[in-house]
Amino acid sequence: MWIAAGIIAAASFFAYLEVPLLIKAKMKKELWVFSILLLIGTMLSIAVSFDMVVPNPLDLIYLIFKPMSQVLDAWLKG
């Protein structure tokens, strides 16, 4: 539980540093992207700290490109 509190504290600190600068510069799109990425990163970090299984993005890339590479390999060997 303390680890999750530390992660939230760190995310809050980063938001405290960055959000006022983005608002002052009127960078609304960047503020949205920063907020969404910070939220996703915070949630994933908390999930890992509670030993939850977090899927690896490379597994999805492998799943997509493996059949394509097999087709290309078969075509090139012809």
Image (cartoon, rainbow, N blue to C red):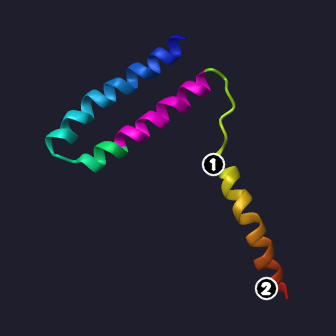
Q: In front: mark 2 or mark 1? A: 1
Crowding near pointer 2: few (<14 within 10 Å), some, many (20+)?
few
**Residue 44 on image: x %, y %:** 55, 32
> To which residue does mark 1 refer?
57
Classify the position of the N terminus by image quarter.
top right
**Gap in angstroms between the C-alphas marked 2 and 1:** 28 Å
Q: Residue at x 67, y 40 (%)?
A: 55
Q: Quadrant of residue 31?
A: top left
Instruction: Name the magenta segment's main secondary structure.
Output: helix
Is residue 36 part of the magenta span, yes or no?
Answer: yes
Question: Disc 1 on helix, strand or loop?
Answer: helix
> To which residue does mark 2 refer?
76
Left or right of residue 64, residue 4 in this image:
left
Q: Residue at x 35, y 42 (%)?
A: 34
Left or right of residue 23, residue 64 in this image:
right
Q: Residue at x 48, y 37 (%)?
A: 40
The three-letter amino acid code for the residue at tag 1 is: Pro
What span is colored magenta in the figure? 34-49
The three-letter amino acid code for the residue at tag 2 is: Leu
| 52 lies above or below 71 | above
| 8 lies above or below 53 | above
Classify the position of the C terminus by image quarter.
bottom right
| 40 lies above or below 60 | above
